Image (cartoon, rainbow, N blue to C red):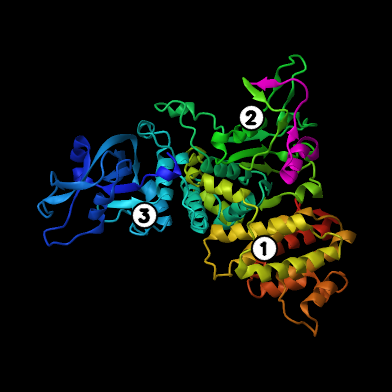
Amino acid sequence: MNEESLPTFWWVNQGTTYDEARKKGFIWAPKQNKSGARLYHWENVSRVRAGDFVFHYANGKLRAISKAKSNGYDAKKELGGSEWSDEGWRVDADYYTLANPVPIEEVGFKLAALHLDKGPVNKSGGVNQGYLFELPASAARLLIARMGDDPALQAIGIRQESIPNEQDGDGSSFGELSKALLGDLAVSAVRTEETLVRRLMSALLSKPFLILTGLAGSGKTKLAQAIARWLTPDPGWADAGDHSKGKHLNPYCALVPVGEDWTGNENIVGYPDGLQGANYVTKPALELIRHANESDYAKVPHFLILDEMNLSHVERYFADLLSAIESGEEIPLYEGSERTANGKVVPWRLPLPTNLFVIGTVNVDETTYMFSPKVLDRANVVEFRMEPKEMAAFLASPQAPRLEELDGRGAVFGKVFVEAAADKAREVPGSVKADYAEEMLLFFNLLREHSAEFGYRTGYEAARFVHFYKLLGGYPDDNSGWFDGAMDAVIVQKFLPKLHGSRSRLEGLLWALAWACGAERGERDGKDFATQLRDASQAEDEGDYGPQVVWDELKAKNADDPAKAARYPLSFDKVMRMWRKLVRDQFVSFAEA
């Protein structure tokens, strides 16, 4: 299948006529009812062309997929009730029955999220009344992704990867992605919330290196696995009749536990065998990168998850990858004669493909190492915390995540995800461009006062983050109300993680940050906001400019959770935690607060 010869996809509702139509190999609809009315979903049968694909729905489930053998043509009625006219349209088709019919409950809400015009489902995901509905390619990919490795798909010769994306500016595609992912995570008992998921996905799209930190056991690794398994094709069960044997190895994902003895890059990119000159000793991370480099999988995302990333010094084992992510240069593997691993030639230099995404998880205790600012500057750092209400909800119904249920469910979005991440021309939406520049300069100058300013890289990556935050939220172009949420994430993910040091070094900066993230932006005592920030950064007048002043003002607005009343609630909450730890211990870092 190619884009020039792309078939049309259809959804047919058959009900009691399904068995007879399947046995005889056709679909049929009347030209009009007994009252003479002509309905578009009947007329659609005349529009079908040989080679089109039809999804067959009957009695609560998708039960078959067929391929049209003929164009739609005039034909007499062979089935149906007396309320239909005898004259109609017919398409001859080869039916392929699904081994595992798909309940409407598993795909209806996803189709509804696509907001299809004259589509087969209503806003609630239930089936609309009607006969034949045209489907866009995005809906067809979604259905095929859900069918996984059903033998019917292999027999009919169709794969989700072979169906190109429609190009509509990709805004609606990302809005659909976010909704579909959240729905699937909830169904599979992966506990999270909408804003966190949007931050994670925006971060991955803006930069293919993400660090997850926070409370041990808060779901960092599970959520990373969930996203990876959802976006990549389902590897299928090792034994379709016995699921206890698990799934096939997923070649698009690798979960690699970092060891405390990792002192070099050989655990990532392998090494030339010193005993066998033609052999190269490979590693799971290298195999994943090699697979991602194959042309057949160039549009499929691949995920390298480095678990407990700071059990060893990150710079010792990750420097090559970190450099390649930034520079785009290839990683040298060996010199001399050609070597092979697992029967395949290993290149002398390893290109890092644009469809590779690296996620590292981090815990902080006496067995781990701190990240250097140069590493943190090259990533988005997302902190996981747990609120009392979240723990209460879990304890009321504790469940382990069922990650196998997520396999391939979002693979329909894989291609557009890879293409968007590789598109370097993404920029801040016009509706918030002035606000973005103003806020970035405010924080640049604030940080610069304490020799903690950011550079061009952070400005560029923050702009991309804001761009994708809007797309994933599905916000219209004339809506800028989302911007504070995006800027809040930029502050807490890009500016704050690099901060660490003693009270003498950080106190003034944390006072100013608390003021910038939480205080009202108007004049105060005849001073404009910029002057207030400079005064706060001196850390001299605690009664006028201390963080507690801002906290108390916000508490008057929200007594239960003052931080939520701040302009930038995530950032203000983090700054307050860092400040309190600084006062208590005389030293603080982002990860420890």
Residue 331 in magenta?
A: yes
Residue 564 relative to residue 136: left or right: right
Q: Are marks 2 and 3 in contact (CB under 8 Å)?
A: no
Residue 318 relative to residue 179: left or right: right
At horizontal 74% and vertical 46% (from top left) the residue drawn is: 326
Q: Position of residue 558 (x, y in %)?
A: 63, 71
Give me the disc on residue 488.
1
Q: Are marks 3 and 1 in contact (CB under 8 Å)?
A: no
Q: Amino acid at mark 1?
A: Asp
Residue topped by disc 2: 287
Which tag, 2 or 3, sits closer to the chain's start? 3
Q: Nearer the viewer, residue 568 or 269?
A: 269
In which quadrant of the rendered image does the N terminus lie?
A: top left
Q: Position of residue 222 (x, y in %)?
A: 59, 42
For the view shown, which residue lies furthest in the front direction? 4
Q: Amino acid at mark 2?
A: Glu
Element marked by disc 3: loop
Residue 230 appears anywhere in the view: yes
Foreground mark, 2 or 1? 2
Q: Amino acid at mark 3?
A: Gly
Q: Position of residue 447 (x, y in %)?
A: 81, 63
Foreground mark, 2 or 3? 2
Residue topped by disc 3: 125
Q: CA distance from mark 2 to mark 1?
A: 37 Å
Q: Residues within 10 Å of mark 1 (few under 14, many from 20)?
A: some
In which quadrant of the rendered image does the C terminus lie?
A: bottom right
Q: What span is colored magenta in the figure?
A: 315-342
Residue 142, compared with residue 172, is above or below; it is above
